[in-house]
Amino acid sequence: MDLEGFTRDKIKNKFNQKNLEEILATRIQEYKNLNDEKAKLMAQSVIDEVNTTLSLDETNDEFLKEIIAVPEAKVAMGEMGVGSRGAGDFFTHRKIAEIVASTNTKSLVNPTEQDDGGVVKVKSNEDDVYITTAVDGIHSRLSEYPFLGGFHVTRATLRDVCVMGAEPVAILSDLHLADDGDVGKLFDFTAGVAAVSELIDVPIVAGSTLRVGGDMVLGDRLVSAVGSVGVSNYPPTARKGASDGDIVLMTSGSGGGTITTTALYNGFFDVVWDTMDVDFIKASNALFKSDIIKNIHAMTDVTNGGIRGDAYEISSTTGVGLELYRDKIESMVAPNVLNMLNSLNIDPLGVSIDSLMLIVPPEIAEDVKNIINSAGVDIAEIGSVNTSGEPTLINDDDTSEKLVPLFREAAYTKIKKLVGDTTPEDFDLMKEKVEYASKRAIFKKEKVIKHILEN
């Protein structure tokens, strides 16, 4: 429970503070073994602290008030579908990328291109070296399964480095556990990260461990992120490299955090074992060890919103078209995983299956397939690149449809099915509000920078 957020909301809405104290004391005792007196003292402290921060509204420092005021969009995360890997999420991430771009700092690949990782170029002994970084957060529904959460988020961030054509060299872990969480969760999560580290011989070099919300958040919710760093002597295989006439290849995929969550919360427990591999990194490393990596036009992992989301993002950021075949795509989904998705009526093209997708010139397609097969990973040709400017899916009956992301990725748990994936009627209005908030954030950033430089 977020004591601070709950209290702030009640006070702002003129809730009786004596009654609020009693409610808070009761809630605190649900989590803490405290007597009535100590619980009330803690409740009073929460209320006092929130009241103190709210008194900032009365300060004469107008600039400080402007800085601490959130540029609200009046659109909630859930309403916009942020984090749900669909149209609302992609739009919001583009607005975040615009804030990043407004800094005018230089990088080779940055969030404006909606790629998996970012890349900077540096000089080393007169040679160009490309440094790739990526960070991923633990799947929110794996908080109760820290080892699996750590294992899969580590795979995810390493994939994001690999698809930029960089060889992973370091892993970083940032771990936040709420006040009542058992310390063992820290160790279990770290063991999951360490398992991947050991399997692929990439060291964990740094990290941070904190409480979620400090004393103000009760419960045992775990949130975390794992980052990775990779290096390459070749330019990145970013999405913008896709060209007309290229062949689209895809490796076999058995999913990661999303598929694990689907399996756990729908009772397909045996499918969890299908996800426990490092095939993606094995396939990538095989390419790195050959000189062919420099000739690959683009690489990505089939994750955010499934291939629907990835195909849409590639077309929208590069202007090329994609023609993909449903039967060939589904043949690359692990049989147990595909069976589970079909049994639960979950679109296999709308969820993360963690395959490696490569866009390559036709003359090297067979060589790429042979190299990846030699690493013990299956791969198939699933389509081609054209100049249509949009992604098209060819169905089994030869009918075609435009591949577009849903408002949210395909619903893979019961609660997600209840929330739904249809686009809200006021989505255009929501986008306007979100865009306005992002522009206000940029304006605030520029005003603060100016103030610091002048003083």
Image: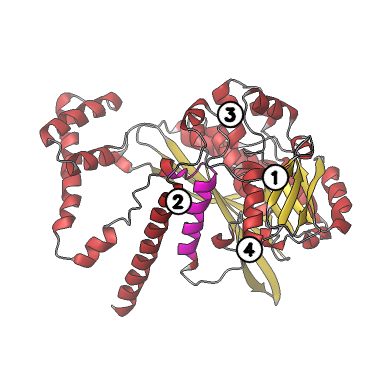
CA separation, marks 2 and 4?
Answer: 38 Å
Which range of residues does the magenta coloring cover? 80-100
Residue visible at 35% across and 52% down? 73
Q: Image quadrant of residue 351?
A: top right
**Disc 4 residue crowd, few under 14, some 14–19, many 20+, Cα 10 Å:** many
Q: Is residue 266 above or below residue 111?
A: above
**Disc 3 residue crowd, few under 14, some 14–19, many 20+, Cα 10 Å:** many
Give left or right: position of 130 versus 192: right
Residue type at mark 4: give it.
Answer: Ile
Give left or right: position of 209 versus 139: left
Residue visible at 81% across and 42% down? 379
User: Dividing the image into 4 quarters, which one contains the N terminus?
Assistant: top left
Instruction: Provide residue 23's location: percent of width, then percent of height.
Output: 19, 29
Secondary structure category for the residue under label 3: helix
Instruction: Provide residue 134's location: percent of width, then percent of height.
Output: 58, 54
Residue type at mark 2: give it.
Answer: Asp
Dot 4 corresponds to which residue? 131
Dot 3 corresponds to which residue? 262
- Of marks 2 and 3, which one's residue comes earlier in the chain? 3
Secondary structure category for the residue under label 2: helix
Instruction: Provide residue 218's location: percent of width, then percent of height.
Output: 32, 33
Whether 92 is among the magenta residues is: yes
- Of marks 4 and 1, which one's residue comes earlier in the chain? 4
Dot 2 corresponds to which residue? 428
CA separation, marks 1 and 2?
Answer: 45 Å
Dot 1 corresponds to which residue? 200
Q: Is residue 173 visible?
A: no
Residue type at mark 1: give it.
Answer: Ile
Between circles 2 and 4, the one closer to the viewer is 2
Between circles 1 and 2, the one closer to the viewer is 2
Whether 235 is among the magenta residues is: no
